[in-house]
Every structure is written in structure tokens, then in C-alpha cells.
Image: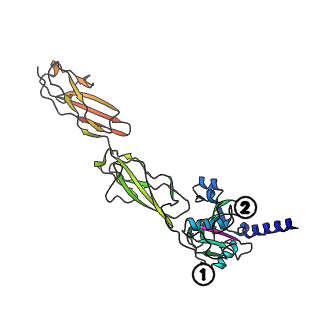
């Protein structure tokens, strides 16, 4: 007899914590299970590690009341004590807290099912898309943790929204960057860049992003605070990055900086022009100084000229004038080539007239 009675009580308690009937709900499951949700960027806010601890004197483990109490304590900053003695079974939450229960969804509030047939469930509201669509995270009695998207087009809409307390931002914000910010392309002088803020966790929140572009690692560029930025020519060769600060209602903001990338020119750029080294004399070797370039060319070709006329066969980086060039002025044409740019041709200053 005692064993039968104990079994009846256990089944009765389990029934009290069973979530709202899925058959009646207009919803879609975004993810299910701790690890599966984490892999998709939907956090359980460390409840998987804390579920054996009782919050608001609720049953521990996978059940809706302990999970929601955990979130109200750790995210909303409420004390780990029931606000009223009647806040026990999920079905009683809305009636016990009727003074703060309405039909207006809000992030950090509690979705409550208690009046509808079979309703005995609470969930934490993570996102409010509209007055008729919300996203919740929840832990189900003897079931799985999941995130759900619920729309107001059926009998599955919550019976009420309980506004215990707005979430309190803390330095232990669960916001985290799962994919770091990055640029839309290689930073190039005089070409506009667009910053991609990356991917953030928990997913499903309404994020706001602010931007600060940085040069040389940590130096903030004055006025560069939008998602787009055009590097200037004086930034050539210097590392550029962008710091993205993410925020969402109820969470402390968090900043992440992209990897730095060197600013490149739009075209192959000569920093110092080519020149001819040596004395212009018959029989004396002259050498080519191809100058300085950014980026440095992959290949250089040469052509020597006498009085602006090409010297046949004189296509090396050095040249020895002969009697045929005596009395002429020599110049050197340098063609710089790089696979990412169009070739650039420059001509050196002329030498003195070639001496005997």
C-alpha cells in the first residue's frame, strides 16, 4: 500500500511539472539538448553544470521551474529565495504573482502556462521579435533543454507573462563572440571597407553593434566609428583593425577586435624612383637601383637607353657603355610586376654624357 501511494505521489508531482502540450503549440524547436544547442550558438547559460543545485527551493535537474529560477537569480539578479510561498508548481506562478503578470512579452520575463488545458510550464524569454512572436529557452521535466520560437497563432501562446525583474547587466555577461569580426576585403588605400561584426552567443538576441577602427594595433582613428571605413594613403603598410562592441538588452556589452591586416595601395606604388649607380664612362660598369616599392614587386625587367633610344640587348640589371654610347646620356627603364597589380613602368634620371 505504501509503495503504491509513493508511486502515485511521484507521478502526481511529475504531472505538475510537465510542460504545455506540444500538440497545441504554434512553435518550432530551434535546438534541443545542451551540447546540440551550444554547437549552434544557443547557450544554456551554464545551467548544464549547475542543474544539481536547487534555486528557489525547486526540484533540481531538468525541470522548468528550477531552470527559470536559476535564470532569474543569475541573469536578472534576484535573490535565491522564492518571492512568494505560492511560487512552487509552474501552474501557480502566474496566479500567485498576478500583480506583475500581463500579456506583454519582454526579454528577461517569464512565459507562463497555467490556465490552459494541460498547461503547467514556465520558460525564460530570450527574444521578443514582435508582440506575437517570442523565443524562449527552457528545461523540461525529465526531458531536454531547448530553445523554442513561439508564435501567437494557436492555443500554445503563454497564458501570461510574469515580469519579476529586468535583467541586471554584470561583468560576467554571457555574451561571447563565436566568430570574430572581420573586413569585407583586403584593406586598400582609398577603397571603402565594411566591417562584419561576426557571430555572437547566445543566438537569437536583438544585438546592437558599435564600431571603432584602429591603426597600429591600439590607436583609435578619430571619427572612425561606423561599420564602414576608407583607409587613407598615409596608412600604407600599417596594420588596420576594427573593434566591435556588442550589446543586448539585459546584458553587459562586450568588445572584440578583429585580426589586424596591412593596408595595401590600389596600385603598385614607387616609394623611391629607380636610379643609375656608377660613373658614365666607356668600359665602366653601371648598376640599376630599382628603387623602393610597396608592395615589393615579384619581378623587375630592365631596358637601357642612349639619348632616349633603346640599346639592343641591354636588358640586364647592369650595363657597360661602349664606344657606341660615347657622348650620349643614358637612362634606365624599370618595369615592376606583381600578380595582384597592373605593371608599372618608371624611367630613371639621365646620366652625365658618357665620357671616353
Left/right of residue 17 with respect to residue 182 in the rendered view: right
Find out whether residue 87 is within the magenta segment: no
Left/right of residue 276 with respect to residue 44 in the rendered view: left
Residue beneath disc 1: 99
| Number of other residues with Cα within 10 Å of mark 2, as a class: few under 14, some 14 to 19, many 20 or more | few
Residue beneath disc 2: 142
**Residue 83 in which image quadrant:** bottom right
- Front residue of 67 and 242: 67
Identify the element where label 2 is drawn. Answer: loop
Vertical placement of 115 versus 74: above or below? below
Identify the element where label 1 is drawn. Answer: helix
**Residue 135 in which image quadrant:** bottom right
Q: Position of residue 41 (x, y in %)?
A: 57, 55
Q: Which residues are magenta?
A: 116-124
Vertical placement of 270 versus 206: above or below? above
Q: Position of residue 299 (x, y in %)?
A: 34, 31
Q: Position of residue 107 (x, y in %)?
A: 55, 69
Q: List the single residue furthest toward the bottom.
A: 99
Amino acid at each position: 500500500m505504501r509503495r503504491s501511494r509513493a508511486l502515485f505521489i511521484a507521478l502526481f508531482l511529475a504531472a505538475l511539472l510537465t510542460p504545455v502540450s506540444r500538440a497545441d503549440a504554434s512553435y518550432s524547436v530551434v535546438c534541443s539538448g545542451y551540447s546540440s544547442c551550444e554547437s549552434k550558438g544557443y547557450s544554456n547559460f551554464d545551467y548544464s553544470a549547475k542543474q544539481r543545485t536547487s534555486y528557489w527551493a525547486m526540484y533540481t535537474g531538468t525541470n522548468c521551474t528550477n531552470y527559470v529560477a536559476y535564470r532569474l537569480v543569475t541573469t536578472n539578479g534576484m535573490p535565491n529565495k522564492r518571492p512568494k510561498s505560492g511560487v512552487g508548481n509552474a501552474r501557480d506562478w502566474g496566479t500567485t504573482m498576478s500583480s506583475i503578470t500581463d500579456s506583454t512579452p519582454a526579454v528577461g520575463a517569464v512565459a507562463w502556462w497555467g490556465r490552459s488545458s494541460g498547461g503547467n510550464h514556465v520558460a525564460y524569454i530570450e527574444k521578443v521579435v514582435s508582440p506575437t512572436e517570442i523565443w524562449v529557452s527552457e528545461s523540461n521535466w525529465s526531458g531536454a533543454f531547448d530553445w523554442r520560437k513561439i508564435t501567437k497563432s494557436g492555443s500554445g501562446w503563454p497564458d501570461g507573462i510574469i515580469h519579476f525583474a529586468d535583467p541586471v547587466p554584470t561583468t560576467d555577461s554571457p555574451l561571447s563572440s563565436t566568430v570574430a569580426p572581420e573586413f569585407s576585403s583586403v584593406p586598400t588605400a582609398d577603397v571603402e571597407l565594411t566591417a562584419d561584426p561576426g557571430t555572437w552567443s547566445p543566438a537569437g538576441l536583438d544585438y546592437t553593434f558599435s564600431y571603432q577602427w584602429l591603426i597600429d594595433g591600439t590607436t583609435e582613428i578619430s571619427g572612425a566609428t561606423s561599420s564602414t571605413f576608407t583607409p587613407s594613403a598615409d596608412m600604407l603598410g600599417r596594420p588596420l583593425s576594427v573593434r566591435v562592441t556588442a550589446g543586448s538588452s539585459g546584458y553587459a556589452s562586450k568588445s572584440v577586435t578583429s585580426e589586424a591586416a596591412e593596408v595595401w595601395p590600389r596600385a603598385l606604388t614607387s616609394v623611391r624612383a629607380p636610379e643609375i649607380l656608377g660613373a658614365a664612362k666607356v668600359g665602366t660598369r653601371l648598376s640599376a637601383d630599382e628603387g623602393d616599392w610597396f608592395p615589393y614587386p615579384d619581378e623587375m625587367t630592365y631596358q637601357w637607353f642612349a639619348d632616349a633610344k633603346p640599346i639592343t640587348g641591354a636588358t640586364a640589371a647592369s650595363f657597360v657603355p661602349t664606344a657606341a654610347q660615347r657622348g650620349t646620356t643614358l637612362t634606365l627603364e624599370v618595369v615592376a610586376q606583381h600578380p595582384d597589380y597592373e605593371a608599372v613602368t618608371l624611367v630613371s634620371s639621365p646620366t652625365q654624357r658618357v665620357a671616353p
